[in-house]
C-alpha cells in the first residue's frame, strides 16, 4: 500500500476518534448509534496508523506530501 495520508489528516482522524470514544463512555451517545460511531472511530484510528485510506483511492485524493527527490524520479515498473 502506498501512503496517501499526510500528518495533519492523521492527527485530525485521531482527534475525531478520541472525541467519539469519550462521548460514548460518558453516555452522551449510546445504543446502536454509539456502536456504529465506535466502529467508525476504530476505522479512523486504523487508517491513521497505516497512513492509507481506501476511500481516497477512487477519488484520487492524496494528502501525503512527497519529498522533492521523489517527485523527480521516474516510476519504475
Image (cartoon, helix red, strand yellow):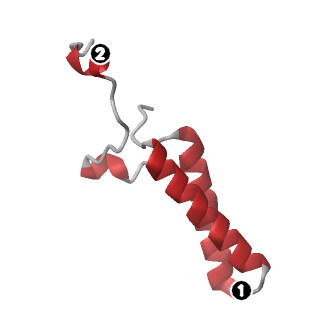
Check disc 1 and report its element: helix, strand or loop. loop
Q: Is residue 25 above or below residue 41?
A: below
Counting from the top left corner in percent of width and height, residue 26 is at: 78, 82
The quarter of the picture where the N terminus appears is top left
Check disc 2 and report its element: helix, strand or loop. helix
- Residue at coordinates 29% horizontally, 15% vertically from top-left? 69
Image quadrant of residue 22? bottom right
The circle on residue 69 is 2
Residue 49 seen anywhere in this rendered image of the structure:
yes
Image quadrant of residue 68? top left
Counting from the top left corner in percent of width and height, residue 8 is at: 46, 49
Marks 1 and 2, the one that precedes in the sequence: 1
- Residue at coordinates 33% horizontally, 29% vertically from top-left? 66
Residue 38 seen anywhere in this rendered image of the structure:
no
Q: Is residue 58 above or below residue 67?
A: below
Q: Which residue is mark 1?
A: 30
Amino acid at each position: 500500500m502506498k501512503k496517501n495520508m499526510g500528518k495533519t489528516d492523521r492527527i485530525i482522524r485521531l482527534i475525531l476518534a478520541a472525541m467519539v470514544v469519550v462521548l460514548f463512555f460518558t453516555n452522551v451517545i449510546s445504543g446502536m448509534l454509539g456502536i456504529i460511531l465506535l466502529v467508525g472511530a476504530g476505522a479512523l484510528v486504523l487508517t491513521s496508523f497505516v497512513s492509507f485510506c481506501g476511500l481516497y483511492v477512487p477519488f484520487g485524493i492524496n494528502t501525503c506530501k512527497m519529498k522533492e527527490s521523489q517527485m523527480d524520479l521516474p516510476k519504475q515498473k
